[in-house]
């Protein structure tokens, strides 16, 4: 697995999916290229990039990913393509002996996730999943605080995500907001894609990585938008460690807010705003303590892993617990459409279009993380109860 590369020759990289979120990967690859760590060898896109889109010198392009891997001799691939394509791209990379940074969620179903993990393991290639929050140095810092008893015994972990998305967001691609498309699973719901980090980060703080360590799942899936998938949801997880984790999320917030994960202890709590790498420690007998931590780039971490064996921060094998949640969402009944009285439309100027807002949902999201409660338990008038997945 380790590249025997004493001269630190730049690693040849191909990027699959260079538009949309993939643009961030392209810019990051170019950053690492300027540092002499990688060389962008090719781009895979269904519609070729124009010269101005390369963020640097143009490189080889091919809509056939396997062919691009073969002609470039790349050692590493970054895959930022639609969710339903992840499995085929990952398996193709493994088949070529190419290491992989694969965007989250890894796959639309647990079976396809297992196929990816098995292909990478059999080929002896490294696969990092793009849960960027897992690169935050705040994670081990919070775990250390918990281990030393800074907030007493852990009572549970809450997570909150209140985001704003407009109609244009759900029109940006044919698979957006879908559960299935052309007979294939997609899984583009709020819990499994836009705010998947709330779940993944909470599981990471608990030290729960394997699928078998999630022992219970209760789901409440709702939608205000006219889509197939959920846009306002809550989940309660029970882990083998005995931890109760509750995440409450929405794309229909009154006001956009930074998502966070909160560790509740018997003598205090720790709040981690994972996009900001910011931690607030509140405990009995002490004033509040806040610190912002650095973050390790996941592609840089993957390169370090390949060169000197540095442990991966988000390896595919550690995504099993998250994929148990994704599978529960996939197999649950369709999200409950909220009645028209439960949401209102807010007009917007320009091409974005209107957006739908669920009045009071911001407070419900915060209360869910604070009280470790689902929407129905908080008395939301539109909440109809939970779908329970057996352990």
Image (spheres, grey):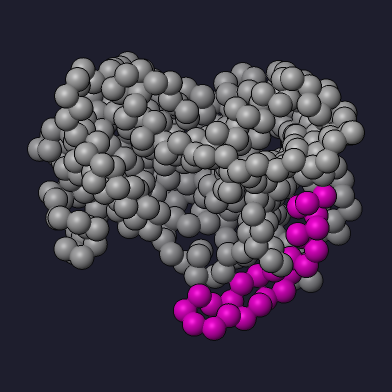
Task: Say which of 82 and 309 sits in front.
Answer: 309
Looking at the image, residue 371 lies above or below residue 140: below
Q: Where is residue 4 in the image (x, y as percent from the top left)?
A: 21, 17
Q: Position of residue 97 (x, y in %)?
A: 23, 24
Q: Where is residue 292 in the image (x, y as percent from the top left)?
A: 61, 43
Looking at the image, residue 278 lies above or below residue 168: above
Magenta stretch holds residue 345 = yes
Which quadrant is the N terminus positioned in?
A: top left
Is 233 displayed left or right of 96 in the figure?
A: right
Task: Say which of 198 and 95 sits in front.
Answer: 198
Is residue 111 in view?
A: no
Residue lying at 60% horizontally and 27% vertically, measured from the top left: 140
Is 259 displayed left or right of 303 in the figure?
A: right
Is residue 314 in view?
A: yes
Q: Where is residue 161 in the image (x, y as percent from the top left)?
A: 67, 51
Q: Residue furthest left?
A: 71
Residue lying at 49% horizontally and 39% vertically, measured from the top left: 295
Task: Say which of 17 and 41 sits in front.
Answer: 41
Magenta stretch holds residue 89 = no
Is 26 displayed left or right of 280 in the figure?
A: left
Q: In which quarter of the image is residue 50?
A: bottom left
Find the magenta span and give its range. 343-367
Is 178 displayed left or right of 76 in the figure?
A: right
Q: Quadrant of residue 309?
A: top left
Q: Quadrant of residue 5?
A: top left
């Amino acid at each position: 697995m380790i590249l025997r590369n004493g001269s630190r020759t730049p690693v040849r990289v191909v990027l699959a999916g260079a538009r949309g979120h993939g643009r961030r990967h392209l810019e990051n690859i170019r950053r690492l290229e300027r540092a002499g760590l990688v060389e962008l060898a090719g781009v895979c896109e269904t519609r070729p990039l124009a010269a101005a889109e390369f963020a640097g010198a143009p490189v080889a392009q091919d809509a056939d990913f396997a062919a691009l891997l073969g002609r470039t001799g790349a050692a590493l691939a970054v895959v930022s393509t639609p969710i339903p394509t992840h499995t085929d791209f990952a398996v193709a990379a493994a088949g070529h002996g190419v290491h992989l940074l694969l965007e989250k969620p890894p796959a639309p179903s647990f079976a396809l996730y297992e196929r990816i993990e098995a292909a990478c393991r059999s080929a002896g290639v490294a696969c990092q999943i793009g849960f960027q929050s897992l690169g935050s140095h705040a994670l081990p810092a919070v775990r250390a605080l918990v281990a030393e008893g800074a907030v007493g015994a852990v009572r549970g972990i809450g997570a909150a995500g209140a985001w704003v998305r407009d109609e244009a967001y759900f029109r940006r691609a044919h698979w957006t907001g879908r559960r299935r498309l052309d007979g294939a699973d997609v899984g583009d719901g709020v819990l499994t894609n836009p705010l998947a980090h709330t779940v993944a980060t909470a599981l990471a703080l608990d030290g729960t990585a394997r699928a078998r360590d999630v022992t219970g799942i209760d789901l409440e899936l709702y939608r205000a938008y006219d889509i197939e998938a959920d846009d306002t949801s809550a989940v309660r997880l029970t882990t083998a460690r005995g931890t109760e984790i509750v995440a409450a999320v929405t794309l229909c917030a009154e006001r956009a807010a930074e998502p966070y994960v909160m560790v509740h202890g018997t003598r205090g709590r720790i709040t981690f705003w994972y996009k900001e790498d910011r931690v607030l420690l509140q405990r009995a007998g002490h004033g509040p303590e806040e610190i912002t931590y650095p973050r390790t780039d996941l592609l840089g971490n993957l390169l370090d892993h390949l060169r000197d064996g540095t442990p991966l921060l988000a390896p595919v094998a550690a995504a099993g617990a998250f994929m148990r949640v994704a599978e529960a969402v996939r197999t649950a009944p369709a999200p409950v459409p909220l009645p028209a009285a439960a949401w209102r439309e807010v007009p917007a100027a320009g091409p974005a279009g209107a957006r739908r807002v669920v009045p009071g949902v911001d407070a419900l999201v915060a209360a869910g993380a604070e009280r470790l409660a689902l929407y129905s338990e908080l008395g939301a008038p539109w909440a109809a109860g939970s779908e329970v997945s057996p352990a």
